[in-house]
Image (spheres, rainbow, N blue to C red):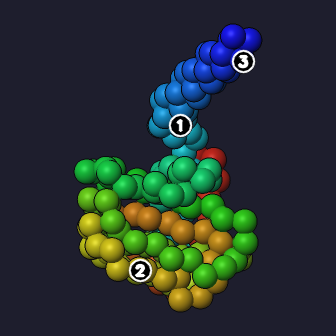
């Protein structure tokens, strides 16, 4: 009888732990999108190859694992001067894809010297094709398709960014 009591006590303890795990998971699923939606904005200023300012964007920062993995997926619109700036710890080859991304994008790969190393124009929505940086990059800027052309963003351009409006 004593062994049976221990068994039932163990089952009750496991039920409590499972309940706490479920609650923690639900809180995480609620908190992460709320954090992302209210995270600070970044002002990105692009400069043409002659050093003149060409465009300004107010973008979201992608820093956490969740933000880096999700990017602009599952969105059906993007502000005209909006986008997302992905922050990585060092220069390395970067690969992106457009699966679950509903907006056509220009993807700008930027090295640690804040120089554009590659621009992939007009990435197709929902496409699973890998888009490579072609050269090591530490930052990646995603903006509406067509902005790279209209803002004269090409390899060799300089990019500046700083904290922007909330």
**Image point (25%, 51%), residue name:** 76
Question: Mark 3 = which residue?
Answer: 3
Q: From mark 3 to mark 1, how far is it between C-alphas?
A: 43 Å
The percent position of residue 42, horizontal first and vertical second, equals 57, 50
The percent position of residue 91, horizontal first and vertical second, equals 69, 77
The image quarter containing residue 104 is bottom left
Q: How many labels, in total?
A: 3
Any mark on residue 130, and which? 2
Question: Mark 1 = which residue?
Answer: 32
User: Is 6 drawn above or below residue 133 in the view shown?
Assistant: above
The image quarter containing residue 129 is bottom left
Considering only order in the chain, which callout, 1 or 2, is on the residue closer to the N terminus? 1
User: Is 87 drawn above or below residue 40 in the view shown?
Assistant: below
The percent position of residue 157, horizontal first and vertical second, equals 56, 80
Q: Nearer the viewer, mark 2 or mark 3?
A: 3
Disc 2 crowd rating (10 Å Cα; few below 14, some 14-19, many 20+) is few
Disc 1 crowd rating (10 Å Cα; few below 14, some 14-19, many 20+) is few
Any mark on residue 96, and which? none
User: Is 50 drawn above or below residue 47 in the view shown?
Assistant: below
Does the rendering let one see residue 23? Answer: yes
**Image point (51%, 58%), residue name:** 69
Q: Secondary structure at mark 1?
A: helix
């Amino acid at each position: 009888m004593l062994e049976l009591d221990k068994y039932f006590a163990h089952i009750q303890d496991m039920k409590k732990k499972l309940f706490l795990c479920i609650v923690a998971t639900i809180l995480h699923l609620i908190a992460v999108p709320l954090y992302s939606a209210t995270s600070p904005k970044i002002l990105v200023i692009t400069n043409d190859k002659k050093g003149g300012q060409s465009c300004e964007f107010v973008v979201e920062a992608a820093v956490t694992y969740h933000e880096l993995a999700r990017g602009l997926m599952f969105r059906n619109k993007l502000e005209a001067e909006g986008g997302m700036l992905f922050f990585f710890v060092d220069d390395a080859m970067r690969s992106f894809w457009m699966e679950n991304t509903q907006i056509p994008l220009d993807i700008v790969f930027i090295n640690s010297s804040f120089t554009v190393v590659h621009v992939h124009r007009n990435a197709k929505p929902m496409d699973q094709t890998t888009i490579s940086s072609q050269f090591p990059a530490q930052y990646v800027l995603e903006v509406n398709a067509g902005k790279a052309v209209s803002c004269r963003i090409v390899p060799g351009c300089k990019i500046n960014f700083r904290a922007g409006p909330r």
